[in-house]
Amino acid sequence: LNNLALPAGGALSYAVASVTSGSGNSATNTVSVNPGDGKCSTGATTCSASATVAVHGGVQISKARDSAQSAKVGDSVQYTVQVSNPTGVAMTQPIVIADPLPTGLESGTWACTGACGDNLNGTMPLATSLVSLAPLSSATFTISAVISASAQGTSIVNTATVTPSAPE
């Protein structure tokens, strides 16, 4: 915004935010303006202001199929669901993970490695919670299921979700 002219008493507002992996518990944003005539209300030649805000943890989910593109009735298919906290801030509230067994799959089981807590394995549907998630950590759910006869000639669509219980 070079050479912007504001009327007396006018204001310019904009928002910029970027929190990356490894960020601490707070972020400071500083803005400065050189009014050109050296007249800041504070008496300084460059006007500036800053604000520090708390950085909350974040949660991400990804899903990938581990086996070949096509499968036939009776084949076992495996896929992974990874729930991760890519920030430097611990997520201290429960995080709900859900992955229903879709039409076309049967006999599903799951096992968890990483930041799973006591939730290490179970049968589909995947419906569990992580008590917390440390900074830069993840829980990986490996899922195995069998292609059922109802899948003959169709595509199987499978969606997993993750829901933090706090605004993280």
Image (spheres, grey):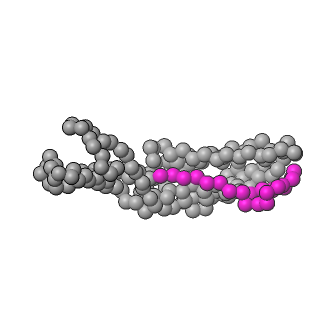
All told, the count of numbered labels is 0
Q: Is residue 159 above or below residue 133?
A: above
Q: Position of residue 117 (x, y in %)?
A: 54, 57
Q: Residue at x 14, y 46 (%)?
A: 41
Tell whether 118 sits left or right of 123.
Answer: left
Quick one: 33 or 20, which is closer to the camera? 33
Q: Position of residue 133 (x, y in %)?
A: 49, 56
Q: Position of residue 47 (x, y in %)?
A: 20, 52
Q: Residue at x 54, y 59 (%)?
A: 138
Residue range in magenta is: 58-78
Q: Residue at x 87, y 53 (%)?
A: 72
Tell whether 36 sits left or right of 99.
Answer: left
Q: Residue furthest left?
A: 43
Quick one: 148 or 12, which is closer to the camera? 12
Quick one: 158 or 11, which is closer to the camera? 11
Q: Is residue 121 visible?
A: no
Q: Position of residue 70 (x, y in %)?
A: 82, 55
Q: Is residue 98 magenta-colored?
A: no
Q: Residue at x 17, y 51 (%)?
A: 37
Q: Is residue 144 above or below residue 98?
A: below
Q: Is residue 152 visible?
A: yes
Q: Is residue 67 magenta-colored?
A: yes
Quick one: 101 or 5, which is closer to the camera? 5
